[in-house]
């Protein structure tokens, strides 16, 4: 059977800081190496919701406050479509600026409150110059829920964070990871990111997926299984270089 995935990339021209575009490339490549066909749909401000709805996997990157402000009014119009897709189980990965818009609100560095989609139960506040930016390499510990067959699993994730906004999870909101090194959501409670159904929100740039092939494969497998309604085993790949990059961050942070 020939598998095919349509990857939706939210606001490529407004939201792709610190290499987040690389997440799209990683998904495309890992599919290509396994002869899974991919189609990339760029969701820009004038893209129809019909095109968005046809995506099997959604990726969103980071952006500074100004670009977030430009994107959010369009994103709010897509709230019901996105929520319905996520509730159906469509997987996604949103990094830094984009997940800030998926919570209840984001208060920018200038104190402007941007309403969010309220899909994730969290709020984000940028304290301007009152608190330092959260910058640096970061390591987290993830749940075995992300372990899949035929792909090596490590319970660590590594990345690079750079955010002024601090995210505070609601009481039922499940974090994506527990902070081992770095700031995570807010530098206080050791939570990193959040998970809603099969959607991951996180602060890890890098790009994240190039150094975390286990999470990339989890996203691909989840998207394929939802689309084809059956269990799918991914062909194993030679991830020596990817894991070396992962280990390098662990070493630098004295984790090994
Ligand atoms: N503007 C947001 C912040 O500083 C997001 C930054 C980013 O995406 N790297 O918190």
Image: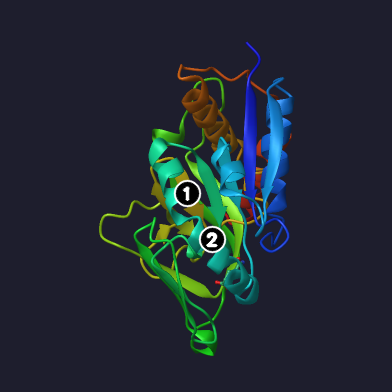
Q: Are marks 1 and 2 in contact (CB under 8 Å)?
A: yes
Badge 1 marks a residue whose secondary structure is helix
Q: Residue at x 40, y 36 (%)?
A: 88
Return the disc, 1 or 2, that comes first in the chain's sequence: 2
In the rendered image, residue 59, in percent from the top left (x then y), is placed at 60, 47
Q: Residue at x 49, y 64 (%)?
A: 101
Residue designated by label 2: 75
Left or right, residue 136 beside residue 121: right
In the rendered image, residue 157, in percent from the top left (x then y), is placed at 54, 46
Above or below, 249 against 26 in this view is below
The picture quadrant where one finds residue 171 is bottom left
Packing grade of label 2 (10 A; few <14, some 14-19, many >=20) is many
Task: Please name whichever residue, 85 or 168, is drawn nearer the observer in this view of the structure.
Answer: 85
Badge 2 marks a residue whose secondary structure is helix
Is residue 176 visible to us here?
A: no
Task: Please name whichever residue, 161 or 247, is drawn nearer the observer in this view of the structure.
Answer: 161
**Label placed on residue 51:** none
Residue designated by label 1: 82
């Amino acid at each position: 059977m020939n598998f095919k995935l349509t990857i939706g990339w939210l606001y490529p021209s407004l939201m792709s800081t610190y290499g987040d575009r690389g997440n799209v490339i990683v998904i495309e490549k890992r599919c290509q190496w396994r002869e899974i066909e991919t189609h990339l749909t760029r969701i820009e401000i004038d893209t129809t919701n019909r095109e968005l709805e046809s995506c099997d996997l959604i990726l969103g990157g980071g952006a500074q406050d100004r670009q977030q402000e430009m994107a959010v009014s369009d994103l709010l119009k897509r709230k019901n479509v996105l929520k319905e897709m996520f509730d159906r189980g469509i997987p996604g990965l949103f990094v830094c600026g984009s997940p800030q818009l998926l919570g209840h609100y984001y208060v920018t560095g200038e104190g402007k409150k941007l309403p969010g989609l309220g899909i994730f139960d969290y709020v984000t506040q940028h304290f301007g110059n009152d608190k330092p930016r959260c910058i640096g390499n970061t390591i987290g510990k993830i749940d075995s829920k992300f372990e899949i067959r035929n792909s090596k699993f490590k319970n660590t994730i590594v990345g690079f964070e750079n955010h002024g906004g601090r995210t505070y999870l609601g009481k039922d909101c499940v974090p994506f990871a527990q902070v081992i090194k770095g700031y995570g959501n807010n530098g206080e409670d050791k939570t990193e990111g959040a998970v809603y159904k099969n959607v991951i929100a996180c602060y890890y740039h890098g790009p994240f997926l190039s150094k975390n092939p286990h999470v990339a494969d989890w996203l691909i497998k989840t998207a394929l299984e939802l689309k084809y309604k059956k269990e799918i085993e991914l062909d194993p790949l030679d991830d020596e270089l990817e894991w070396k990059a992962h280990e390098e961050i662990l070493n630098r942070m004295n984790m090994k």
